Amino acid sequence: DPMEYQILLDGQLLADWHADRTTSWTPTATQRGLHTLEVRVRDGFVGYASDSIDIYVVRQPLSPP
């Protein structure tokens, strides 16, 4: 059965339910510090699971050359 993913950053929706497992987030200068990233997964039979991690942003990522 197909799996769908939802991603939240600090409890706010970053990516709504979709089948694509890749989502990007580039923190801004105002988003330094501690954040919680939560990933939720569901299947076509109403099965549901989630997991979260804490991440700490030290600085805004550097742009590629």
Image: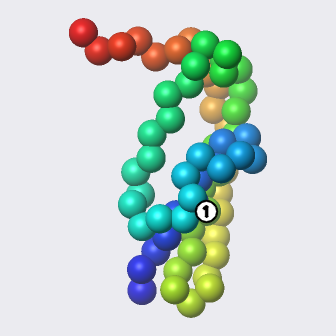
**x and y, in percent, of residue 12 in the image:** 71, 46
* Residue at image point 36% right, 13% down: 63
**x and y, in percent, of residue 34 in the image:** 72, 27
Residue type of the residue flagged with mark 1:
Arg
Q: Is there any visible trace of residue 6 in the rendered image?
A: yes
* Residue at image point 50% right, 35% down: 25
* Residue at image point 45% right, 39% down: 24
Q: Is 39 drawn above or below residue 3 in the view shown?
A: above
Q: Quadrant of residue 55?
A: top right
**x and y, in percent, of residue 30 in the image:** 67, 16
Q: Residue furthest bottom?
A: 45
| Residue assigned mark 1 | 40
Q: Residue furthest right?
A: 11
- Neighbor class of circle 1 (other Cα within 10 Å; few <14, some 14-19, many 20+) is some
**x and y, in percent, of residue 58 in the image:** 60, 14
* Residue at image point 41% right, 58% down: 21
Q: Residue furthest left?
A: 65
Q: Is residue 60 left or right of residue 49?
A: left
Q: Quadrant of residue 62?
A: top left
